[in-house]
Every structure is written in C-alpha cells, then in structure tokens.
Amino acid sequence: MTLADLEATFKAAKKVYFADKTDKANKKAFKKAKKAFNEAKEAQGAESGKKRAAEESSESPKKKKKKKKHDKDVVDIASLKATLKAAKALWREDKSHEANKKAMRAAKKALAAAQEAENGASAEAAEPAKEVAEKVEDTNLLAGLKSNKKKYDQKKSFDDDETPPNTKVFLGNLSFDIDEATTRKFFEDCGEITDLFWLTDKETEQFRGMGFATFGTLEESAKACEKNGQDLMGRAVRINYAKPRPGGDNRRKSGGGGRGPKPLSEKPAGCTTIFVGNLSYDIDDAKITEFFKDCGAISQIRWLKDRDTQEFKGAGFIEFEDPDSSLDKAVGLNGSDLLGRSIRCDYAAPRKPREY
C-alpha cells in the first residue's frame, strides 16, 4: 500500500474509533492503522534523506550553487504566505478583534515586501521585507498567530479529543430564513432529529444564525458532521460536535435561558380557534385529540404545510365544538410537554371570509 492509502485507512479507522470508543475491535484497528502509517512515513522520510545525501555527494564542488551574499537576509516567502493565510482565517472568524486585523495587515505587508525583494534580486530590495518581518516578530504577532491558528484548526476539527463525539451537533452560519422543516429535510439522510434548538439574542430575541440539533445515535450525528461546509440555503453551513455543557446537557425549556413560555396574545373578538406550534413531527390527529381531551371536543384540526412541498411545518390550528368553554382551557396548556416538546398554544384570529 502507498503512504496515501495508509493515511486514508488510518483516518477512516480513527473516525470509526472516535464514533464508539467502547468497541475494542475499533480501538485495535485504529492503533494498528496508526502504527502502519507512522512507520511508512518514517521509512519514506529516511529514504528521501538518503537520496538527497547521495545527490549532494555526487555533485562537483564547482557545480554547487553559490549562495548569494544576501541570501541570509531574504525572508521565506512560503512561510509568510502561510502566516497571511492563518491571519486571514482568524480575522474572518472574528472581524471585531483588533489584534487579528493588525496581524493580518502586518503579514500582508511583509509578504508584499518579500515578493518585491525576490523580483528585484538585490540586497537593497530585500531589506524592506526583512525589516517588516522583524517588526512582526518583535510584536510577537507571528508567534501569536501560530498559537491561534492551532486553536482555530482544533475548533474546525471533528476528531478533536477536546470535543468527543456525541449525539448533539452545533449548527453555524445558518441563513436567517432557516426553519425547522428545511433543517430536517437537509439532515433526512443522516437520521431523525430528536431536538432542535435555535440560539437567539437574550435581549432582542432575534435569531443569531446558530443552533443545536440532537440525533438519536452517534452514527447519525457523525453523518451530520460530514455535511460540514455543504450549501444550505445559499450558505456553507458549519457543523461539528457540540461541546458538553457544564453540569450536564439537560434539555432546555421553550423560550431558552430558563425563561417560561411566551405570554398569550389578547383574545380576539369572535375567536373560535387556537394556534399550536413547536409540535413534534410525530404528531397526528389522535395524539393531539388525546392531549386536549380535558378541554372539550375538537371539531376540526388543520395542520400547516409548505405550499410547494406539502411538508408539515410543525404547527396547526384547532377548532372546538364549544369555543366558549374550551378555548381558555386549551391555551392554558401553553408551554406543556407534548411528545418531548414544550408546545405553544395561543388564541388565533378568526379567518377573514373569502371574497368572490
């Protein structure tokens, strides 16, 4: 097997092992693949070193390339390019961080000066690049970037030991038009989402473009993480395992942040219907009827569906045979648990008559 084949086998074995660390067979296969890959890599490195030494020894002293006097002053362009790339990645991750912005500009300036020096091929042209690079080093920006880049890469990695595989995944860079139906459709080939939680601003309660999705098994959440970077409503969605919350990962109640359910709206005149939202996708007529059995007899149930796909949107409307005695009891169940969800119940405005 080639080194590339051994590396692919090692990565595959690692992924399987991290998905279920209790399986001894997976652990054994992972260690074996890791050992084979490392041995092959060391062997290839040793072979390359021998080949390089042989080539150097066979060269005539006269044919050896003479170093230019100013070579020691020329900055490594490849290193500066890598530094600039790291700086850009950090700055884009948090554009409000002034240090990241400063580091990116310094690295960009150093690279431009180094490239100019290389094109000019003179000691005088090399000095600006050397001066800028030394200035960056003096302010410890490059050292800081290397440290931050490592943290940034770990944040992006799903095999990171700091965040072990679990059934809950973080969703980031989401469209502000995202909804539950679209999210479930996106992950339908991974498995069923048992819980979906959107992150909102504590003060304005506006959606922050992030959330958490919980799956039934580790295998399903692993498949979900493989979708990292795929397009979802025009955005490259960011997906990785969610970090365990201090003190456990108990399910949050509706409203988030420990707040209670949303307050009821004012009862409209002539109201005969209630709205029900945040429903499980396993809901049906029989289950909703059983839930409201103490409120009164239900005369009609209307589930909300997407006009184009006809997919259930997790909400609906319920009409009772005796609205006067049933509606207030029904909305009193606002925030109650139904199939593992804190459902929303509220008064619904009467539908306007159709105009013919």
Image: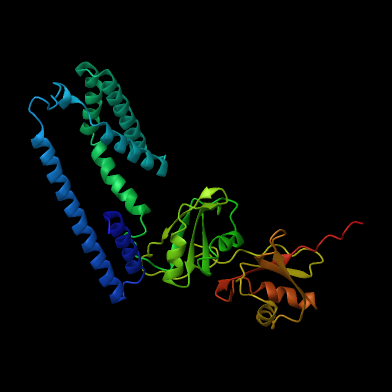
* Image position, residue 59 (x, y; %): 10, 32
* Image position, residue 8 (x, y; %): 33, 58
Residue 80 lies left or right of residue 282; in this view the side is left
Q: Is residue 49 above or below residue 19?
A: above
Say which of 220 and 250 sits in front. Answer: 220
Say which of 252 and 162 sits in front. Answer: 162
Q: Quadrant of the C terminus?
A: bottom right
Which residue does the image show at 46% across and 68% down from the upper left? 220
Residue 148 lies left or right of residue 355; in this view the side is left
Say which of 272 and 250 sits in front. Answer: 250
Q: Is residue 75 above or below residue 205?
A: above
Residue 244, located in which quarter of the rendered image? bottom left
* Image position, residue 209 (x, y; %): 52, 52
Residue 234 lies left or right of residue 315; in this view the side is left
Residue 299, located in which quarter of the rendered image? bottom right
Callout count: 0
Q: Quadrant of the N terminus?
A: bottom left
Which residue does the image show at 23% across and 67% down from the upper left? 32
Q: Is residue 213 above or below residue 231?
A: below
Going by the picture, which residue comes out furthest to the right? Answer: 356
Q: Is residue 161 at all visible to an observer of this figure?
A: no
Which residue does the image show at 27% across and 25% down from the upper left? 114
